[in-house]
């Protein structure tokens, strides 16, 4: 926190960059609305250039444009153009340029008034303000400081106005005719015009900005520039006040680009613009043609003609929609940074992870709300970015420490778990011994193939499967998942498997099986656990499958040469959730060579180290990639390998169980008589050492 405070106070180059980006964000979220519309731009645009020729025009045409605007009675005219050289279209200049001209014609042309004189005459006596460009070097043509209206300075010791070494202005004959002169220059910040000058120094002369001078010419009120101390200043023009900084800069409050600000010079010269559109308006003349390169980037991210920025400044002044950044805001920002950092540093260790994240979000949201509120209500440019960054850094450090302590606690828990691993290993062997080995059980079977795989997330788990012949021709299979993991789930798994198998012996259809199992398992459920299950009975003579789904993942199936599909079934809730629920039964005709794969959510919800889930879509892609002739054993191995590659070294998140059955068709050889004589009530698996992944 201390390092961040020093960084913010020192303001290295990247600090203002982030600050300006935040201030631009304020304006983009809430741009200024165009309310008063005091300014009109007469644009030398593409239609004007197409009608009257390329720029620069003869100054007689500019004089004609000024005269027609003046006749409409504007409050003032601001010319965002410079005329520093003699007009090459003047008669005398033409006589000098054309070599083959007769001496008499040349003499007569030289006797005619110059175009510059015509422009000066059009300016003289009218409320026209010409532009002056400040330069970093002295222009040899304009060694003397420009004429500018006197500005009353008070608190001058606090002012440090932007100083230009030289300037560029219109020809003296034209300049002397103007009612005022205004500064055009600004200093773009990262190619974006965020601030302009109320006034600047050229030599020892203070020159007001073009927009300020237009207001002075229009109103006749004197100008006063007041230093307020602490980098603050104020430009006053009668009752109008514009907050600024000691260097003469002020923040521009932008509104969106609006074509309603513009009138084409072609329409003015053509007489199609009503006088009411220009009457009592502050009229700006500027170029907007695409090839004239006078385009600037605003804080809204828009590229607009430079003359439009002057119009937006006039609108801002009339609407009083100013932006302010008092010097004491930096102290407030430092205080906000310290307060946010201290609050998180002391609160996060005492809170849980969820509450800590909520507190951090609330702190950042409060900072953002404070910045936006100050901007909207008072036009304050409060930099809340760095307090938010400081809060983030402190939150990350403290949270990392808390997570480190939690990791140490997990290490101690692992040590405790190691002391009871022997007992759990014994429980694992007992649990896995309850599951049949389909390949051994149906080794002589030719009508179908079955294989299954189970991997507990922990030493013991809550998933289970079972498969056996209900009679000589019907294969029963089930895959189930007990809620939870570990030892409690494994105990409930053993109970549930036993009751489900017992119910299967006594009920002839899977719907009745689910109803009976739901009733019996619920009676032995003090911890209110539940079981999802998919059960099916396959008639090996006809391929007819009847199945029922109790809140389980729908299985996948694929016929030879067909697309992969899921056995969607309305089913019902998991077992032990709703009493006396009548589970519906669905029927499906299984094609010869078709396989059906049942999985638990331990497959689709397998998680890698990055916290990503394996997902049903990835499982579908793995199954689609398998050939039609794939055996259940190969299918299970392929899916397990794909899940393993995805998970990598991450700890399993849930028990993983798969069962696949493939029917070979009605023409397949029947099972051996020896298998038909098997005692269906006898146990189907021993308690020998199981193989993880198969039993």
Image (spheres, rainbow, N blue to C red):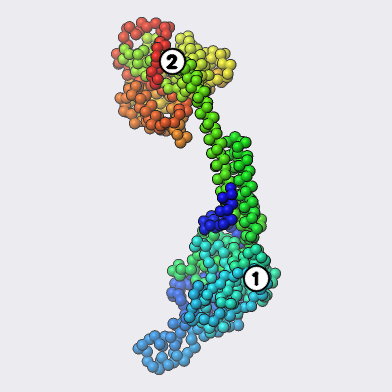
Question: Which residue, given by chain and number where applicable, does mark 2 sit on?
Answer: 429
How far across and down, in percent of the image, does residue 527 sit?
Answer: 58, 18
Is residue 509 visible in the rendered image? The answer is no
Q: Nearer the viewer, mark 1 or mark 2?
A: 1
Q: Is residue 202 above or below residue 107?
A: above
Q: Is residue 195 above or below residue 677?
A: below
Compare residues 591 and 693 and report the one nearer the observer: 693
Q: Residue at x 49, y 66 (%)?
A: 295
Compare residues 345 and 362 and report the one nearer the observer: 345
Q: Quadrant of residue 32?
A: bottom right
Q: Which mark is residue 661?
A: none
Distance from the alpha carbon under mark 1 to that under mark 2: 90 Å
Evaluate if marks 1 and 2 touch, with contact meaning CB atoms under 8 Å apart.
no
How far across and down, in percent of the image, does residue 575 sit?
Answer: 53, 19
First of labels 1, 2 by sequence position: 1
Q: Which mark is residue 157?
A: 1
């Amino acid at each position: 926190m201390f390092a961040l405070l020093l960084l913010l106070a020192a303001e290295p180059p990247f600090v203002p960059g982030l600050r300006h980006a935040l201030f631009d964000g304020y304006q983009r979220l809430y741009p200024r609305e165009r309310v008063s519309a005091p300014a009109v731009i007469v644009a030398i645009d593409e239609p004007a250039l197409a009608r009257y020729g390329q720029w620069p025009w003869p100054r007689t045409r500019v004089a004609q444009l000024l005269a027609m605007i003046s006749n409409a009675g504007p409050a003032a005219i601001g010319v965002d153009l410079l005329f520093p050289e003699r007009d090459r279209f003047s008669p005398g200049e033409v006589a000098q340029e054309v070599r083959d001209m007769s001496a008499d014609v040349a003499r007569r042309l030289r006797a005619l008034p110059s175009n510059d004189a015509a422009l000066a005459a059009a300016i003289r006596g009218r409320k026209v303000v010409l532009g002056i460009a400040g330069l970093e070097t002295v222009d040899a043509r304009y060694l003397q400081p420009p004429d500018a209206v006197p500005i009353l300075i008070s608190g001058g010791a606090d002012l440090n106005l932007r100083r230009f070494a030289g300037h560029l202005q219109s020809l003296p004959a034209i300049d002397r005719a103007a009612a005022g002169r205004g500064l055009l220059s600004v200093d773009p910040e990262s190619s974006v015009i965020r601030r302009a000058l109320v006034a600047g120094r050229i030599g020892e002369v203070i020159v007001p900005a073009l927009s300020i001078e237009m207001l002075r010419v229009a109103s006749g009120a004197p100008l006063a520039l007041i230093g307020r101390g602490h980098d603050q200043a104020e430009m006053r023009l009668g009752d109008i006040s514009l907050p600024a900084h000691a260097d003469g800069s002020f923040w521009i409050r932008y509104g969106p680009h609006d074509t309603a600000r513009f009138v084409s010079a072609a329409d003015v010269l053509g007489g199609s613009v009503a006088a009411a559109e220009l009457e009592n308006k502050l009229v700006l003349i500027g170029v907007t043609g695409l090839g004239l390169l006078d385009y600037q980037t605003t804080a809204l991210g828009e590229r607009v003609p430079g003359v439009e920025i002057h119009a937006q400044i006039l609108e801002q002044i009339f609407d009083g929609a100013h932006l302010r950044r008092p010097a004491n805001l930096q102290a407030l920002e430092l205080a906000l940074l310290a307060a946010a950092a201290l609050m998180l540093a002391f609160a996060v260790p005492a809170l849980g992870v969820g509450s800590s994240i909520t507190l951090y979000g609330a702190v950042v949201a409060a900072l953002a709300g404070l910045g936006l509120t100050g901007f909207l209500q008072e036009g304050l440019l409060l930099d809340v970015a760095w307090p938010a960054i400081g809060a983030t850094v402190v939150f990350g450090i403290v949270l990392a420490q808390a997570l480190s302590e939690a990791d140490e606690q997990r290490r101690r828990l692992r040590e405790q778990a190691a002391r009871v691993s022997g007992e759990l290993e014994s429980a694992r062997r007992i649990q896995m011994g309850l599951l049949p080995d389909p390949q051994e059980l149906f080794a002589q079977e030719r009508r179908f193939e079955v294989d299954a795989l189970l991997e507990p997330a922990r030493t013991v788990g809550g998933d289970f499967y079972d498969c056996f012949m209900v009679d000589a021709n019907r294969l029963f299979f089930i895959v189930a998942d007990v809620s939870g993991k570990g030892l409690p789930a494994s105990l409930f798994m053993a109970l549930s498997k036993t009751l489900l198998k017992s119910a299967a012996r006594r009920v002839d259809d899977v719907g009745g099986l689910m109803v009976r199992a739901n009733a019996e398992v619920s009676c032995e459920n003090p911890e209110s656990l539940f079981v999802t299950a998919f059960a099916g009975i396959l008639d090996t003579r006809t391929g007819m499958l009847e199945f029922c789904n109790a809140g389980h993942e729908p299985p996948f199936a694929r016929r030879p040469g067909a697309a992969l599909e899921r056995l969607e079934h309305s089913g019902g809730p998991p077992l032990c959730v709703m009493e006396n629920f009548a589970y519906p039964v669905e029927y499906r005709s299984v094609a010869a060579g078709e396989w059906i794969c049942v999985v638990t959510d331990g497959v689709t919800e397998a998680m890698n180290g990055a916290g990503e889930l394996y997902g049903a879509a990835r499982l579908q892609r793995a199954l689609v990639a398998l050939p039609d002739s794939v055996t259940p054993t190969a299918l299970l191995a392929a899916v397990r390998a794909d899940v393993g590659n995805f998970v990598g070294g991450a700890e399993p998140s849930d028990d993983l169980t798969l069962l696949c059955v493939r029917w070979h068709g009605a023409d397949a050889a029947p099972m051996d008589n020896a298998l038909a004589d098997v005692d269906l009530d006898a146990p189907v698996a021993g308690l020998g050492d199981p193989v993880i992944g198969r039993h």
